[in-house]
Amino acid sequence: MESELQTSGVTSNIMPLAFPRGKEKFCELCKREAYLQCTRCRVTFYCNAEHQQADWVGIHERICHLLVRMRTPTELIDHAARRDDQLRKAELIEICRLVAQSKLSEGKYEEALPAAHCCLHTSIDVHGPNTVQLLPSYLLLAEANMGLDNLAVVAELLCQAKWVVLKHPESGPLIQQQLHRSLGRFHAAVGNLEAALHHFANDVYFSSEEYGLDSINASKGYFLMAEVFVRQGKIPVARSLYSKVAHTWHKHLISLLHHQTEISHKRAVSSQSFYEQSQRVEMDEMLRAMLEFEQKQFRRDAAQIALLAHSLAMLWFLGGDLQKALGFGTTALQASQQITKHDLTEPVQRLLQQVQSLQPGSGSRTAEKQRH
C-alpha cells in the first residue's frame, strides 16, 4: 500500500497548452496517447496510472533524474554537448540492461519489461534501427516475455534479433552465442526439443570459441542441453553432461575460494565482489537442479552429490550466507564419507571449519576450549 501511494503521487495530468501544437505525448511503455506525466522529471508520459506505476517500479525511479537533460530540447547543440548527450545515453543503456538482468534473475519478469524497453528505445536512439547493438535489448525483452508465457511476442522479438545478426555477418561469437541460447530456450519452451538441442549446441560452440571449451560460459549451454535430454528420457546422456558442468563449476569455485583466502589475509574483502546477487541466484539454481536430479536417481552417485553440494557450499560461503554454506557443506561431507578415502572429504571439512569459525559466538566458544 505504501509503495502504491508513493508511485501514484509522482504524476499529474498533462496540460495540453503547455506543449507546442502537434507535439503529442505518448506512453513510455505502450506508445499510446498519454494523459499523465511524471511530476519529477516532467519529460516522461503515460497513458494511465497502471503503466506509470509499472515503469516506476521497473526502472523509472532509478533513472528519473537522468532523463531531464536528455529529453529537454535545446536550440543550440555544439559538438561537445552532443558528445556529452551520447555518453549520458550510453550510461542509461547500461543501467537499464543491468536492472533488467537483475530482475530477470529474480524471476520478476513483469518488472523487467520497463527497463528492457528503455534499453531498446535508447539503443535505437544512439545506434539507429537494425544495428547489432540492439541485440541485448531484444534478448532481454524475449526472456521477460518468455517468463510471462507471451510466446508469440517472444517469437517476434527473436525474429528481429535474427534479422539484426543476419544483416551483420561480422558479428563476433559472443553475439552468436547469446542469440542461439535464446533461440534454444524458446524452442524448449514450445516443445521443439530437437531444434532446442541444435541451438544449445551452437551456444556451446560459440561460447567455446570465445572463452574456451571448459569455460563456465560454455557450461551453461551444456546444462541446457542436459535439461532437454532429461525431457527426452535420455538420462545417461544428461548425467554425463551434468557431470561435465559440475566439474567445471567446482574447479572455478575452488579457484575463487583460494583467491579470497589469499587476499583476506592481507585486507578485509567483501564477498559481494565475487558475484552479484543475480549471478549467484543463477548459479544456485543450476547447481541445485543438478543436485536434486542426482538425489532422485535410483542409483545415486555419491561422488557427484559430494561435488555439487561442495560447490553450493563454496558459492554461498563466498556470498556470505553461512547457514546455506553449512547446510550444503554438511551434505557434501556425508556424501564424501560414503566413499573410502574420497579426495573431497578433507577440503569439505576445511570449509566447514571456516564456516563455523565465522558464525556468531564462535570466538567465545574457541576461547572457552582454550581455557579448558
Image (cartoon, rainbow, N blue to C red):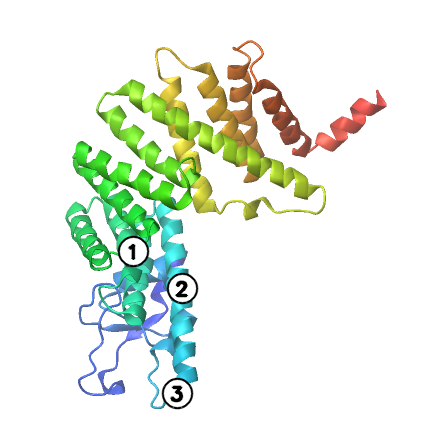
Based on the displayed image, in which of its 4 quarters is residue 183 positioned?
top left
Q: Mark 2 points at which residue?
A: 61
Q: Name the residue under label 1.
A: 171
**75 on left or right of 212:** left
Q: Are marks 3 and 1 in contact (CB under 8 Å)?
A: no
Q: Name the residue under label 3.
A: 78
Give how far apart the Cα atoms at labels 2 and 3 are.
Answer: 30 Å
The crowd level at tag 1 (other Cα within 10 Å; few <14, some 14-19, many 20+) is few
The crowd level at tag 2 (other Cα within 10 Å; few <14, some 14-19, many 20+) is few
> Can see residue 210?
yes
| Residue appearing at x 62%, y 26% in the figure | 352
| Residue appearing at x 33%, y 37% in the figure | 221
> Can see residue 4?
no
**3 on left or right of 226:** right
Type of amino acid at the residue the image marks with label 2: Glu
- Residue 363: percent from left, percent from top: 74, 32
Q: Which of the two marks, 2 or 3, is nearer to us in this view? A: 3
**N-term-proximal mark, 2 vs 3:** 2
